[in-house]
Amino acid sequence: MQPPLPPAPIPPPRPLPLLQALKVARGNTLAVIPQAAFVEPVFQQRSPLGPSFLVSAPEGVKRVLLDAADNYPKAAMQSRLFEAFLGEGILTSEGETWRRHRRMMAPAFDPRSVEAALPTIAATAREFVDGWRPGQVIDVSAAMGELTLKIIARVMFSAAGDDLGPVMERTLRSAEAVLERFGVADFVPGLMQLRARRREREIGARFAVFDDWISRLIAERRAAPGHGDLLDRLIAARDTETGATLSDREVRDQFVTIFIAGHETTAVALTWTWYLLALHPQIEARLHAALDASPDAPPAYARQVIEEAMRLFPPVPRIPLRQARADDEICGVRIPKGALVCVAPWVVHRHRDHWDDPERFDPDRFAGERPERYAYLPFGAGPRVCIGASLAMTEAVTALCEIARRYRLTLVDAGGVGMKPRMTLRPMGRIGMELMARGA
Ligand code: HEM
């Protein structure tokens, strides 16, 4: 039997007129992407902000993110919006500042550090599942958000994370509400600066409590390190080229960045994984068999399931916008200086040229030979590839296994699931799922 289709919007056959596109995009920004974008290597989009291109052919993606990455820095307009609460962290900086941040943060995310975080991740997931009861109905999206919040907060701050995590979450939700007001008025010359300053003031005020907590914690840790968490590692980080360390403000900015980049993304990856498993009982059964055959370590199939779920529902559906510094050509299409360039895993991962039957959920796509590097990029690629990719995979696979060893999650109402993409591919509203004890 053909399983019901996941809630992806059906691409319009032709680009929508601008006003209609703006209206549709308010509900779902991915619903305006027309069919042509899923078959063409480079698709020119209509945009009120000037020429704009969606690049989806692997060689084009490679050019933007790797070969000509210097010509495609992040679009300043988008980074400025985030700087209001991220400061000048690794996600928003460019050039030498970014290179310095990346050099200093890299050791905190290397394989040794990820391995050191594994016991915390596994114990937190186990403790979380201990709180569940068979027959309980959960909102899987909220539950995965809660779990990844606990995990990232402990990986970052050890025990202090249990208090600081929720403060950070509340702060971000409240700051996000300020960003949601960003709109057409922000492009009106004269109003633009005024609104940006007001936004920064409002966001600063909402961060006051969190900033106070973190600066106290940083002072305590500078005096007494030794917790072996991410906070200790960043405080101790030294630039291999200059010997410089991070200031308190820089440590704070990196933490807000890591939290934003790493918490909801992983939650979303897990949420869609549960949704897809619930719709595909044969694949769920294979996962259970693989888990039963490998009681002490995550089976390879668990990783395949997560990878395939992130293909269909990439947690970051559009990689942050780039802007061409100089004229260029991608796959024969002229890209003028100043053009906005977007690489959208949402489109690349469902592109007709790279994937057979792209809408089908099939974790076997990730068995054996890897798919073409630039046709599958949930974590981006090139120098700005996600620094937390291996931590995120470890976390997602561990959480999936810890939960699936004990429970099946079945959809209470499959009809009501929708998408509300922002920076991440959030589901719309709640996804009710019932917890069935395995083997019961
Ligand atoms: C499934 C989970 C995740 C996904 C899908 C994801 C995806 C991404 C993507 C697409 C980018 C942008 C790449 C670009 O601009 O070219 C990115 C950047 C980044 N991610 Fe992740 N991410 C995830 C989890 C994490 C985690 C767990 C952390 C840290 C704890 C993290 C930290 C970062 C940082 C710091 C950057 C900025 C890197 C830079 O600009 O140099 N991410 N991520």
Image (cartoon, rainbow, N blue to C red):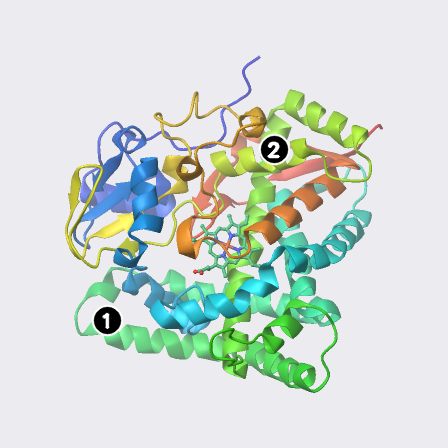
Q: For residue 299, which quarter of the picture?
A: top right
Residue at left offset 47%, top offset 79%: 242
Marking on residue 314: none
Q: Nearer the viewer, mark 1 or mark 2?
A: 2
Q: Of residues 368 and 401, which is closer to you in this image?
A: 368
Q: Is residue 254 left or right of residue 78?
A: right
Name the amino acid type tagged 2.
Val
Up-down: is 335 above or below 220?
above
Percent of width and height locating residue 67: 31, 49
* Residue that label 1 marks: 192
Q: Are marks 1 and 2 in contact (CB under 8 Å)?
A: no
Q: For residue 214, which quarter of the picture?
A: bottom right
* Residue that label 2 marks: 305
Up-down: is 158 above or below 242?
above
Percent of width and height locating residue 200: 38, 76
In the picture as drawn, the residue positioned furthest to the top comes out as: 1
Q: Of residues 408 and 75, which is closer to you in this image?
A: 75
Residue at left offset 65%, top offset 66%: 156
Up-down: is 250 above or below 73?
below
Mark 1, ligand 1, within 8 Å: the answer is no
Percent of width and height locating residue 196: 31, 73
